[in-house]
Amino acid sequence: MPADLNLRISPRTVQQETVDKLRLAILSGLFQPGSRLVESQLCAQLGISRPSLREALRSLEAERLIEIVPNRGPSIPALSWEEATAIYEVRELLEVEAAGRCASRIPAEQLRELERSLLAFEEAAASHDSLAQVTTAADFYSIILANCGNPILEEVHRGLVARISFFRGRSMSLEGRAQSSLAEMRDIYESIAAGDEKAARKASKKHLLKAKAAAKVAMENGV
Amino acid sequence: MPADLNLRISPRTVQQETVDKLRLAILSGLFQPGSRLVESQLCAQLGISRPSLREALRSLEAERLIEIVPNRGPSIPALSWEEATAIYEVRELLEVEAAGRCASRIPAEQLRELERSLLAFEEAAASHDSLAQVTTAADFYSIILANCGNPILEEVHRGLVARISFFRGRSMSLEGRAQSSLAEMRDIYESIAAGDEKAARKASKKHLLKAKAAAKVAMENGV
DNA sequence: GATTGCAAGAATGTCAGACAATCCTGTTGA
DNA sequence: TCAACAGGATTGTCTGACATTCTTGCAATC
């Protein structure tokens, strides 16, 4: 029996469920940025006790998905454009690196998976379902990050992307953004498929810069 | 009155104090890797209640400084060399970028601060106090990261460095490591002082590669 | 009318105690 | 020797409580 086969069934605790539910709610924009989360209300809605909720909130605070100010409680942080820019810059650093590494080491099976996710995004881009666009695009990146050979890169990237999900939904719904995004992602895919590390980095960098620019436009339009 | 002047005095809560105390304890190696942290014991030692402790533990879990397995409780993760390598690689990515940016934008006052920290490390290197060496070296990086113009870069870097503190103490006590580390750091400082971005990146990269190699040796020696 | 001061209500920070579910360990029995 | 089991230890979760702090509306003052 392989040693790394983890047979432990990890029971899902109330706190884990709560973190997942709240994270999903935040990422899908259920709460307005700046709005406060009242513990007693959340307890009632989630059907859990206050200690369990507070543990979950501490986890989300450490992920920077919420802020907790002493004696004021938790709230959804309003991301400034400066912060978003900083995140995009670091994300670029990580994603470019991941794409480059991925080009030289992705297994054939995973490459097919990447192609599938590209096709899924193509379909979403053709429709006008911006939620599907964001989801399928996220899948595409996830596969790249998961195959770059560095789990930390993946972990950090996931954390950062979560924090700018607010902008990604809005920029994707800009006129023509989905289509040009598709073209850029196809470039990335083809560079990786060709095993061309340098091209993959270049394509990835270009994509990120355009995504950042689109996010800026979306923000300034105040969509 | 400037809008960004934060006059709010933020009261320190029990949970914050606890997170800080435990983090410090973990980083200074008070707990053996793999050892379990028993809630009731920690409560007694810290003089706090279990709910407060559990909140603090969730924060530390999200920072990846401890692991919490359902029904087994918190423990200090034993970092494998593969994980440490992955962290060193991402750290390299971030630190090289930060050094490069820093070279072209650090204010004169902060540059002097950087020089002071270099001198402090020099002093520590001359002594055989490896704790002082790690501390002063950390100060040196902190100043670079704080002046790279990207707070996210700094934040992510801090999180990663914390996780490999275990190795840094050990590698610094290798024969001659402190001295060669000093030479590398002086290179970085001088490149930054000269405003030479390219040289700063190069020097930073070289330093990181050597640090990683030293950490590997330290680990294999099983110090 | 605008501002200050105050008081009631709401929300948070923290604790104590409880109990079921799970894990760990040593003993017993085959 | 190995498997089953019993007991204690530990965690997951809840309820309830209370002091402290924040918020808000109203009254009083300039």
Image: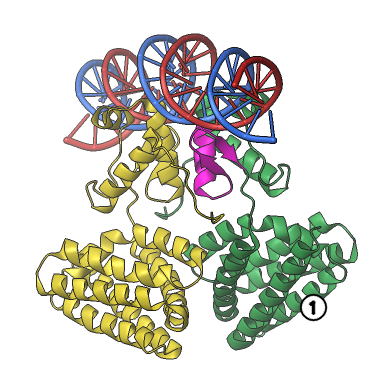
Chain colours: A yellow, B green, C red, D blue
Q: Is residue B60 magenta?
A: yes
Front residue (pair A146, B171): A146
For the point 11% across and 74% down, which residue is it? A126
Q: Is residue B1 magenta?
A: no
Q: Position of residue B146 (x, y in %)?
A: 57, 65
Compared with residue A64, is residue A197 higher up or lower down, i.e. above or below?
below
For the point 40% across and 35% down, which residue is it? A13
Q: Position of residue A79 (x, y in %)?
A: 34, 57
Q: Quadrant of residue A116?
A: bottom left
Q: Residues within 10 Å of mark 1 (few under 14, many from 20)?
A: some
Q: Is residue B223 rendered to the left or right of residue A191?
A: right
Q: Residue beneath label 1, please?
A: B183
Q: Is residue A88 rendered to the left or right of residue A117?
A: right
User: Please, what is the three-letter code of the amino acid marked with disc 1?
Assistant: Ala
Q: Position of residue A95 (x, y in %)?
A: 42, 74
Q: Which residues are magenta?
A: B54-75
Q: Secondary structure at mark 1?
A: helix
For the point 32% across and 47% down, which residue is it? A23
Q: Quadrant of residue A207?
A: bottom left
For the point 23% across and 51% down, which residue is it? A29
Residue B12 visible in the snapshot = no
Q: Is residue A129 rendered to the left or right of residue A161?
A: left
Residue A158 visible in the snapshot = yes
Q: Quadrant of the C terminus of chain B?
A: bottom right
Front residue (pair D28, A153): A153
Front residue (pair B91, A218): B91
Front residue (pair A17, B141): A17
Q: Quadrant of residue B186?
A: bottom right
Compared with residue D26, is residue B179 higher up or lower down, i.e. above or below?
below
Q: Position of residue A177 (x, y in %)?
A: 19, 76
Find the residue positioned furthest to the left.
Answer: A127
